[in-house]
């Protein structure tokens, strides 16, 4: 059984590593392009929940802004880590530290023209409420508006390699990208 777990864990790490190296189309424009992002806060439902392969869950809420030219990011929010039975393991905050990538999937005629779907990769710093734990992670944010690729799920995934935490299954909650004029 340990061999199977190690193999699955190794495949997950390899898969996420390949995602980071894969070609990724980003929105390009002449001059700055600014967006606001929302994770489980008004006007979308939340919190946004993701699960790891053990059944542990993280719940995130928050908001911020990012720019594609140059790549900048602001924002943050709250995070709760629960075990598979729903018991709270830890609480804290997350702060956006680096804008890695953004792929736009466009808009929908049924929504405001500034609401946009896509996928963003944001570097984050995580800090427990009591200050005993601080580490960095990678936050994928996915919003299902526009020309959505098959197999995409609304929500977030969070990778925290230092602690071997890979919340890679979107469970619930909503996200949104808002293009700013």
Image: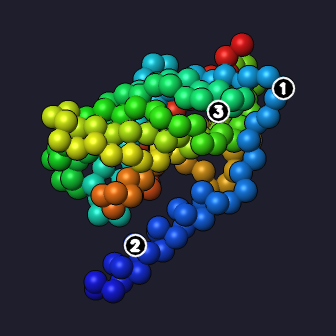
Q: CA distance from mark 2 to mark 1?
A: 42 Å
Q: Residues within 10 Å of mark 1 (few under 14, many from 20)?
A: few
Residue for badge 3: 71
Residue 169, above or below 15: above
Image quadrant holding the N terminus, namely bottom left
Please identify the quarter of the rendering in which residue 53 is found: bottom left
Horizontally, residue 134 falls left or right of residue 18, namely: left
Q: Position of residue 71 (x, y in %)?
A: 64, 33
Q: How many marks?
A: 3
Look at 37% across and 28% down and name the residue there.
Answer: 77
Q: CA distance from mark 3 to mark 2?
A: 31 Å
Q: CA distance from mark 1 to mark 3?
A: 13 Å
Look at 67% across and 54% down and name the residue there.
Answer: 150
Name the mark on residue 30.
Answer: 1
Residue for badge 2: 9
Viewer-nearest of labels 3 and 2? 3
Horizontally, residue 137 falls left or right of residue 180, namely: left
Q: Secondary structure at mark 3?
A: strand
Q: Residues within 10 Å of mark 3 (few under 14, many from 20)?
A: some
Q: Residues within 10 Å of mark 2 (few under 14, many from 20)?
A: some
Disc nearer the start of the sequence (2/1):
2
Please identify the quarter of the rendering in which residue 180 is found: top right
Q: Tell me if I can see residue 46 in this picture.
A: no
Identify the residue at the far top of this view. Answer: 181
Q: Secondary structure at mark 1?
A: loop
Disc nearer the start of the sequence (3/2):
2
Report if the CB atoms under discs 2 and 1 are less than 8 Å apart.
no
Residue 139, above or below 35: below
């Amino acid at each position: 059984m340990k061999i199977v777990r190690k193999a699955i864990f190794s495949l997950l790490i390899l898969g996420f590593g390949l995602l980071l190296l894969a070609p990724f189309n980003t929105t390009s424009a002449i001059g700055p392009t600014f967006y606001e992002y929302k994770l489980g806060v008004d006007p979308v439902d939340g919190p946004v929940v993701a699960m790891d392969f053990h059944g542990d869950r993280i719940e995130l809420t928050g908001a911020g802004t990012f720019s594609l030219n140059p790549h900048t990011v602001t924002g943050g929010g709250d995070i709760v880590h629960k075990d598979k039975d729903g018991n709270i393991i830890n609480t804290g905050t997350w702060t956006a530290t680096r804008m890695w990538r953004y792929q736009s999937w466009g808009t929908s005629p049924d929504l405001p023209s500034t609401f946009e779907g896509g996928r963003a990769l944001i570097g984050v710093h995580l800090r427990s409420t009591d200050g005993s734990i601080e580490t960095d992670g990678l936050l994928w944010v996915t919003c299902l508006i526009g020309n959505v690729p098959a197999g995409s799920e609304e929500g977030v995934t969070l990778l925290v390699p230092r602690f071997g935490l890979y919340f890679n299954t979107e469970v619930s909650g909503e996200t949104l990208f808002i293009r700013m004029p």
